[in-house]
């Protein structure tokens, strides 16, 4: 626990990505695999389930600190974080624990689940007394299930790649999907590349940047493939070992929710992975995204809903065929194989091929794009015909060319109550984008959500307030929204260095995690597009 | 009948006709210490400790009438006995003891009980009524030991040297900067100062406080002379273009507020070091206890919280509203 607590402190002390990766690599190089795998688990974004309620923790910590509950609450107001408040209130006796991280997690933390209150209390107090101050903070963070420390999953992957000598792509792939934090898994994670593929595991999604200039700058249009950009859920459909897995981009396994897709997926040949957009679709066109939301999160689906909101996958890529990873083949080749594959699959139109929008010039594509809204599409995707299927978000080969190019995925950082009709509800939001490992506030927006969505965000704000400054609440950075705006300009008045015109919430991206939100670089790249 | 009362100009002693740290110009002001929120220009006469005479002089116009009195020496102001006693906050900081007809009141000003080589240590003064500050009056505030913090600062400084960065250590120009200076090891590297820090440091040296050698950063022409240096600057400096002259640097802030992670992160600095010139929670309660006071007025900071806690311990305690700010985690305007 001592060395993990030191790592945690080192990550917290620096804002430089390079230094964080150094600290992570240093830890992974020396930590026993049994500990290291838990570090990967937690730092990679897996949250420990909350084992003990916050109200009880407050009570027990106040008793242990010898202060009344009201004084605990005053302290909490000043600190804004339960784990840290407890850490600061308990006496620092100078002890430190020799037990390893794995021992703490496996023998002390996980067994708390389902214990009766008295056992939990005794175990918590025992742990507090055995741990040094920084260790206690980490322990409390594990207990309260809020483990953010400014180290992203990507940084963990880069550190592991450095330690193992493997590529980031291999590490990222091996970390996809479900795995148990065991030393055996850690050994497999760092083992030489043997093209292994776990049955259920998806490929890291290759992501596109928003096009930040006129497409003519991309060169000869003949080198590019254009497709409609649909507004659904990015998904991989996997058929291996006679089983089907549907993964969202947020690495969520969506099996059971889309039975019509699983039914036709069984027709695919063994060892097939499709990448595409999961959409509600009737006849020749998609339904609005809001319709899809009726299906998201629902595990049992009635016949009526199935008939009203049938779902398809518009497939645009084929990372695996015949059990072979074909991501390095040129897009042209993958598309051709995909077309043949889908033609030969009697999927009743549920597995659709994302056809090219044919064009002889960029102007042809401009014209096509101007009809995107009528098609129910968001714009066009532009992909270099020679491009491999990469890992993560890379500039150069894949571009989103949306009808409304000025939009950014941002994280809700602050909320404050509205006025008038919206008094008492948290309706006025400040959003941030990533700069290094930190969020920098970027725009305020008040409109665009439905009444129901506002109530859900309001409830989230109340449950996830980290700090209060007068009426303004700092909230846990968790919710992602697509912000749309009309213009963007440089500004010295804003911390982000940009000011946007008429920002509003285009959509609540429940399918995205905060780390999927855009970066300040992406936002600044829009400046040139807007001629600012 | 209360010996002191709170007026719209500050704490006032009617029997002796003087104010303690008034926030508007009055005829006679007793000044606990020279921080901006405790000194008002334009009073006819000021009383301060002999030790604090020099630093107060930097805050006032030349023609102001300032009288210095040594710690413990009793003066008679309109029949009331007034004496100053060391508060350990900064050079010359005082508690004010006021006695009339056997009734004793003490105003703490800002104070700390931790050792600080740059000023006379705090002395408990028995009294009936104690008026205390409460800047860090929450049980989350427990200061780490001074030597441990300086070990951290030195380790950070050395790591910055290895990384080829300058070290920018932020702290108030008056008091905090000199206390930091006294704890720094000049063998690690050169110590440079921001102009306002250099000015106050000269005043400390003139008062006989031994401090390691410093150079004003502006006097250094050659970039090479800044290599490996630690630069002491006021908290506002890191938001100005002034820092550009340092090249690559790592910034740390020395303040009691740095005990809390959120305060550290809000400032976007690399490191926070917990060094405060105020009492932490246990020292605050200890100091109150040692006065033997039955009645406590609690001012600037977490006054309501501390007053409630004291009442629960059986004391007669109330929170009073003053305009003092104590230590702030944002740069104080007008405080060089």
Image: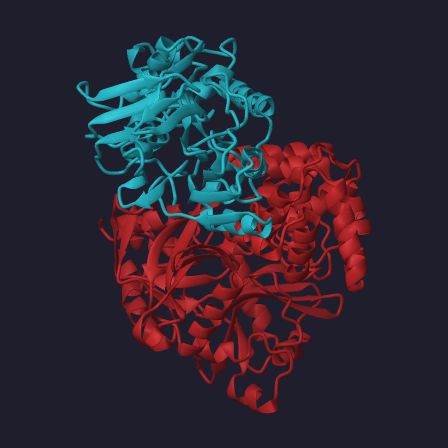
Q: Is residue A296 above or below residue A209?
A: below
- Of the 4 image quadrants, the one containing the N terminus of chain A is top right
Q: Residue at x 72, y 54 (%)?
A: A197
Q: Which residue is at the front of the view, B32 or A182?
A: B32
Q: Give me the residue at 40% from left, 47% from top.
A: B320
Side of B42 where A41 appears, left or right: right
Above-or-below relation of A208 to A38:
below
Q: Nearer the viewer, residue B278 or B292?
A: B292
Farthest residue in the left direction?
Answer: B63
Q: Is residue A304 above or below residue A152?
A: below
Q: Can residue B195 be seen at all in this image of the molecule?
A: no
Instruction: Chain A: give its colour.
Output: red
Kindly indicate the quadrant of the structure image that contains residue B231. top left
x 47%, y 65%: residue: A509
Residue drawn where x is 28% and y is 56% of the image: A500
Is B61 situated left or right of A225 in this image? Answer: left
From this viewpoint, which residue is outermost toward the bottom? A304
Image color mode:
by chain
Residue extending furthest front? B101
Q: Quadrant of residue A251?
A: bottom right
Tell me, what hue is chain B? Answer: cyan
Image coords of residue A137 (percent x, y): 64, 44
* Residue A209 place in picture, x, y as percent: 42, 53
């Amino acid at each position: 626990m001592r060395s993990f607590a030191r790592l945690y402190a080192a990550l917290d002390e620096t804002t430089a990505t390079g230094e964080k990766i150094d600290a992570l690599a240093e830890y992974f190089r020396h930590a026993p695999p049994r500990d290291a795998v838990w570090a990967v688990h937690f730092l990679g974004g897996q949250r420990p389930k909350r084992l003990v309620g916050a109200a009880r923790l407050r009570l027990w910590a106040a008793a242990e600190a010898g202060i009344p509950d009201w004084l605990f609450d005053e302290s909490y107001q000043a600190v804004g974080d339960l784990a840290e408040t407890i850490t600061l209130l308990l006496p620092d006796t100078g002890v430190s624990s020799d037990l390893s991280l794995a021992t703490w997690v496996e023998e002390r933390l996980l067994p708390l689940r389902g214990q009766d209150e008295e056992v939990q209390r005794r175990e918590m107090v025992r742990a507090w007394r055995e741990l040094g101050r920084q260790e206690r903070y980490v322990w409390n963070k594990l207990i309260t299930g809020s483990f953010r420390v400014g180290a992203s999953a990507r940084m963990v992957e880069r550190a592991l790649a450095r330690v193992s000598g493997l590529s980031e792509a291999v590490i990222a792939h091996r970390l996809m999907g479900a795995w148990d934090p065991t030393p055996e898994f850690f050994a497999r994670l760092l083992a030489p590349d043997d093209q292994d593929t776990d049955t259920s595991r998806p490929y890291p999604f290759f992501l596109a940047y928003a096009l930040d200039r006129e497409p003519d700058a991309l060169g000869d249009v003949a080198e590019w493939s254009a497709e409609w950009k649909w507004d659904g859920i990015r998904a991989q459909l996997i058929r291996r070992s006679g089983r089907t897995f549907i993964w969202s981009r947020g690495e969520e396994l969506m099996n059971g929710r889309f039975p019509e897709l699983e039914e036709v997926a069984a027709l695919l040949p063994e060892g097939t992975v499709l990448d595409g957009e999961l959409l509600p679709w009737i006849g020749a066109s998609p339904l609005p995204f809001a319709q899809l939301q009726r299906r998201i999160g629902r595990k049992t689906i009635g016949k009526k809903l199935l008939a009203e909101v049938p779902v398809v996958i518009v497939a645009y890529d084929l990372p695996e065929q015949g059990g072979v990873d074909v991501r390095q083949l040129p897009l042209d080749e993958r598309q051709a194989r995909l077309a043949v594959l889908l033609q030969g699959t009697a999927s009743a139109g549920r597995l659709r091929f994302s056809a090219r929008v044919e064009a002889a010039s960029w102007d042809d594509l401009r014209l096509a794009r101007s009809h995107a809204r009528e098609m129910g599409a968001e714009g066009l995707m532009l992909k270099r015909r020679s491009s491999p299927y990469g890992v993560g978000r890379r500039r150069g080969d894949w571009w989103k060319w949306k009808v409304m190019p000025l939009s950014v995925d941002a994280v809700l950082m602050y909320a404050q109550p509205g006025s008038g009709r919206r008094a008492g509800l948290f309706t006025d939001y400040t959003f941030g984008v990533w700069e290094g490992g930190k969020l920098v506030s970027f725009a305020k927006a008040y409109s665009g959500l439905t009444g129901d969505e506002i109530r859900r965000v309001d409830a989230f704000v109340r449950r996830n307030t980290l700090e209060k400054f007068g009426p303004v609440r700092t909230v846990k950075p968790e919710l992602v929204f697509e912000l749309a705006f009309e213009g963007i300009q440089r500004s010295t008045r804003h911390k982000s260095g940009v000011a946007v015109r008429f920002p509003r919430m285009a959509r609540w991206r429940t399918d995205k995690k905060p780390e999927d939100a855009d970066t300040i670089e992406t936002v600044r790249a829009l400046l040139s597009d807007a001629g600012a | 009948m209360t010996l002191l009362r709170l007026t719209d100009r500050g704490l006032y002693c009617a029997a002796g006709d003087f104010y303690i740290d008034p926030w508007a110009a009055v005829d006679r002001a007793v000044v606990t210490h020279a921080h901006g929120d405790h000194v008002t220009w334009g009073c006819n006469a000021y009383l301060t400790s002999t030790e604090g005479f020099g630093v107060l002089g930097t805050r006032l116009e030349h023609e102001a009438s300032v009288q210095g009195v040594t710690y413990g020496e009793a003066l008679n102001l309109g029949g009331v006995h007034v004496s100053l006693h060391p508060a350990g906050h900064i050079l010359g900081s005082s508690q004010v003891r006021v006695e009339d007809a056997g009734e004793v009141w003490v105003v703490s000003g800002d104070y700390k009980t931790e050792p600080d080589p740059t000023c006379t240590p705090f002395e408990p003064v028995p009294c009936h009524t104690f008026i205390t500050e409460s800047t860090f009056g929450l049980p989350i505030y427990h200061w780490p030991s001074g030597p441990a913090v300086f070990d951290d600062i030195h380790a950070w400084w050395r790591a910055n040297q290895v990384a080829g960065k300058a070290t920018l250590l932020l702290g108030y120009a008056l008091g905090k900067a000199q206390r930091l200076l006294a704890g720094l090891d000049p063998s690690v590297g050169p110590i440079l100062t921001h102009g306002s820090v250099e000015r106050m440091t000269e005043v400390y040296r003139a008062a006989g406080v031994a401090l390691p050698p410093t150079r004003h950063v502006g006097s250094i022409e050659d970039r090479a002379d800044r290599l490996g240096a630690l630069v002491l600057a006021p908290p506002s400096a890191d938001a100005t273009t002034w820092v550009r002259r340092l090249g690559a640097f790592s910034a740390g802030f020395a303040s009691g507020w740095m005990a809390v992670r959120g305060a550290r992160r809000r400032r976007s600095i690399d490191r926070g070091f917990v060094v405060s010139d105020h009492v932490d929670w246990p020292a605050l309660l200890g100091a109150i206890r040692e006065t033997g006071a039955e009645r406590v007025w609690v001012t600037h900071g977490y006054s309501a919280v501390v007053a409630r806690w004291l009442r629960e311990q059986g004391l007669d305690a109330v929170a009073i509203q003053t305009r003092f700010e104590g230590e702030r985690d944002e740069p104080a305007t007008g405080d060089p």
